[in-house]
Amino acid sequence: DFVLVGDSGEKDPEIYRKICLKYPTRIKAMLIREVPNRPLEGERLRRLTDALPANRFRKFTDAAELQDLSKRVFEN
């Protein structure tokens, strides 16, 4: 199983979405750091959240949040 970690600045969310659709049972979680100059919102966010159950997708803004997020991911 895999946890995908990236940011919203480039194409990470779109690439990860394709991976989630191809291997839905292998992706434990997707964690995306939201960068200020390219927020993850609107249609871009909707398409991404459609690819994974809500409890497996998380946005964050600071790397310090990863420790808490990873604990929650691995508890499920």
Image: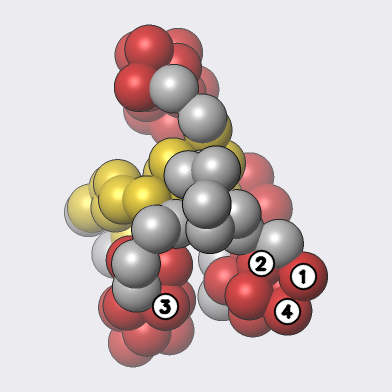
Q: Nearer the viewer, residue 2 or 60?
A: 60
Which tag, 3 or 1, sits closer to the chain's start? Answer: 3
Whole-angstrom CA distance, mark 3 to mark 4, is 12 Å
Q: Amino acid at mark 3?
A: Glu
Q: Which mark is residue 42?
A: 1
Where, by quadrant of the figure, is residue 10 drawn? Answer: bottom left
Helix, strand or loop under label 4: helix
Outermost residue, left direction? Answer: 1
Query: Which of marks 3 and 2 precedes in the sequence?
Result: 3
Q: Quadrant of residue 74?
A: top left
Tell me if label 3 and label 1 are in contact, CB under 8 Å. no
Above/below status of 76 relative to 33: above
**Residue to which mark 3 is pinned:** 14
Q: Secondary structure at mark 1?
A: helix
Split into 4 quadrants, where in the image is the N terminus? bottom left
Q: Is residue 66 above or below residue 1?
A: above
Answer few, some or many: residues within 10 Å of disc 3's Cα (few below 14, many 20 plus, some between 14 and 19).
some
- Rounded to the nearest whole Å, what is the CA distance between mark 4 and mark 2? 5 Å
Mark 2 highlights which residue?
45
Residue 54 is situated, as x and y percent measured from the top left of the image, at 68, 53
Amino acid tagged 1? Gly
Query: Which numbered disc flags the more N-terminal residue, 3 or 4?
Result: 3
Disc sitting over residue 30 in the figure: none
- Residue at the spot of label 4: 43
Crowding at dot 2, Cα within 10 Å, few <14 / some 14-19 / many 20+, comes out as some
Please report contact status of discs 2 and 3: CB closer than 8 Å, yes or no: no
